[in-house]
């Protein structure tokens, strides 16, 4: 038999004193850790969260144990050190599967809560991009909370990222249950506020809208009491919304939405637009070429989140009776009852629009126009609704050498159909046919029928 080399023989002999020393050291360390855990829990029971957080953070740094890191996350959160709590929680996630199922579920849910809370804090601090990432991480941890995707979308809207916001809203829509309310979603019973799904579909439409086209055409039979003739007369303007400062029977506008202007006060929308207005020849629908009026301008939202719009426009004479001028106008409008109400055969509906403007050339003049409707809307099927209503409208011009001021009131009915809906978006377009019978109230107002059609896309 060949003897083993001396070095090998020594290596095979256990170093029992060294092993005993190491075991003793491990026992001492484990005992110290247990003492630290007991201290941390005692501090937590006294609600001394600052001290408890310090104890558990140091312990987790030494042990790396998932339960110690979970305790550190909880103590830091209670101490109000949100960012550090999230950091401990994220370090825990790769090892979270080492926890028992109840602690594992609690750890993931609590970290999701911390990210959500952080998202709201970041939004209040004016950091929407970071808030969006926080909400998205919270949803990644707890996918059942679909509303976190919606919160991420709203934060991206605040950051001016309309495409990213639309994607988050669409993803939330895809993950909502087909029926029934979502916990914390704000879903309502029939007759209440729109469900979360419908609100998000509206947000998708607005976030993805980069341009708008609108057109209208009206006709009033001539010969009624108080009728006035000629292109651009006060009578030809009656009943038309949004173009009452300039007398016209028809018009079209194309608007392009610019990136939103962001400031500490909020987001403000801005649009560039070009439009044309015209009147007809006599009782026909043929356009009077002499009346064609062009215009290009910019429309700005002076108050964030409001319906106020400030417009600066250069009017361009196309026809011989049109004008070259500058027009600055301030407008406001509001609607109610545009959306159908589940479980209701009819519901109140109305709209109001008002604008004031200043023309600067040819001596200058100031004009004011307002129109309001109030009625009841009922569904007809196939997307159509009918709205019988009362209407009042007025136009004032100062100075008024050509007697262009008037006021009218009457009754009418509007047929409306929305179109262009997708699974992720409500209807983008709308068509309306309007019939009203009006009475003169003052000025050059007319009595008689008004027919109009309008389209928005």
Image: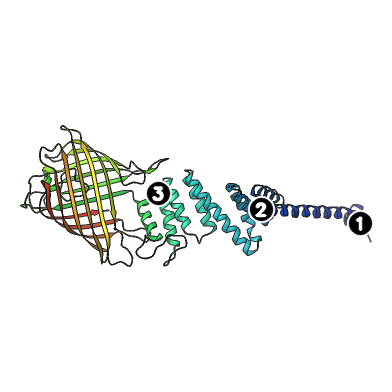
Q: Which residue is mark 3?
A: 162
Task: Answer left or right for 82 relative to 402.
Answer: right
Residue 339: image quadrant is: bottom left
Q: Is residue 421 above or below residue 126?
A: below
Task: Answer left or right for 148 relative to 56.
Answer: left
Nearer-N-terminus badge (1/3): 1
Q: Secondary structure at mark 1?
A: loop
Task: Answer left or right for 162 relative to 217.
Answer: right
Which quarter of the image is occupied by the N terminus? bottom right
Which residue is found at the position 46% from the left and 55% from the top?
149
Could you give the CA–CA distance between mark 1 and mark 3, rounded to whole angstroms?
78 Å
Q: Which residue is mark 2?
A: 44
- Res 287 seen here: no
Q: Secondary structure at mark 3?
A: helix
Q: Is residue 276 above or below residue 341?
A: above
Nearer-N-terminus badge (2/1): 1
Could you give the CA–CA distance between mark 3 and mark 2, rounded to whole angstroms?
44 Å
Q: What sort of colour scheme is used for the picture?
A: rainbow
Could you give the CA–CA distance between mark 2 and mark 1, rounded to whole angstroms?
60 Å
Q: Picture coordinates of residue 48 (x, y %)? A: 65, 49
Q: Picture coordinates of residue 198 (x, y %)? A: 37, 60
Which is closer to the viewer, label 1 or label 3? 3
Which is closer to the viewer, label 2 or label 1? 2
Q: Which residue is mark 1?
A: 4
Q: Secondary structure at mark 2?
A: helix
Q: Picture coordinates of residue 88 (x, y %)? A: 62, 51
Which residue is found at the position 64% from the left and 55% from the top?
70
Q: Circles 2 and 1: CB distance less than 8 Å?
A: no
């Amino acid at each position: 038999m060949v003897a083993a080399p001396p070095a090998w023989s020594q290596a095979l002999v256990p170093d029992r004193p060294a092993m005993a020393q190491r075991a003793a050291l491990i026992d001492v360390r484990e005992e110290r850790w247990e003492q630290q855990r007991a201290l941390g829990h005692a501090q937590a029971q006294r609600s001394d969260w600052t001290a408890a957080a310090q104890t558990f953070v140091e312990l987790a740094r030494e042990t790396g144990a998932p339960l110690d890191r979970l305790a550190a996350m909880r103590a830091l959160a209670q101490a109000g050190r949100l960012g550090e709590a999230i950091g401990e929680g994220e370090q825990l996630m790769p090892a979270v599967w080492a926890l028992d199922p109840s602690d594992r579920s609690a750890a993931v849910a609590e970290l999701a809560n911390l990210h959500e809370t952080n998202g709201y804090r970041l939004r209040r601090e004016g950091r929407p991009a970071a808030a969006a990432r926080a909400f998205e991480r919270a949803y990644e941890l707890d996918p059942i909370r679909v509303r976190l995707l919606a919160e991420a979308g709203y934060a991206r809207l605040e950051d001016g990222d309309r495409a990213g916001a639309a994607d988050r809203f669409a993803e939330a829509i895809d993950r909502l249950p087909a029926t029934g309310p979502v916990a914390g979603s704000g879903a309502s019973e029939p007759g209440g506020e729109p469900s979360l799904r419908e609100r998000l579909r509206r947000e998708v439409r607005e976030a993805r809208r980069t341009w708008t086209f609108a057109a209208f055409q009206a006709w009033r039979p001539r010969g009624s009491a108080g009728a006035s003739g000629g292109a651009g007369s006060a009578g030809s303007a009656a009943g038309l919304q949004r173009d009452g400062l300039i007398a016209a029977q028809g018009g079209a506008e194309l608007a392009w939405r610019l990136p939103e202007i962001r400031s500490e006060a909020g987001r403000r929308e801005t649009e560039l637009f070009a439009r044309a207005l015209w009147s007809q020849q006599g009782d026909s629908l043929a356009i009077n070429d002499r009346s064609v009026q062009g215009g290009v301008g910019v429309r700005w939202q002076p108050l964030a989140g409001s319906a106020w719009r400030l417009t600066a426009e250069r009017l361009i004479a196309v026809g011989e009776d049109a004008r070259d001028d500058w027009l600055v106008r301030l407008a406001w409008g509001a609607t109610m009852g545009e959306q159908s109400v589940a479980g209701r055969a009819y519901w109140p509906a109305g709209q109001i629009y008002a604008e004031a403007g200043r023309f600067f050339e040819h001596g200058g003049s100031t004009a004011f126009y307002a129109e309001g409707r109030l009625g009841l809307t009922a569904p007809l099927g196939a997307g159509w609704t009918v709205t019988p209503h009362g209407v009042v409208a007025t136009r004032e011009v100062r100075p008024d050498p050509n007697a262009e001021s008037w006021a009218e009131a009457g009754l009418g009915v509007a047929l409306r159909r929305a179109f262009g809906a997708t699974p992720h978006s409500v209807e983008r377009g709308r068509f309306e046919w309007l019939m009203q019978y009006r009475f003169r109230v003052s000025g050059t107002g007319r009595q008689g029928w008004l027919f109009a059609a309008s389209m928005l896309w």
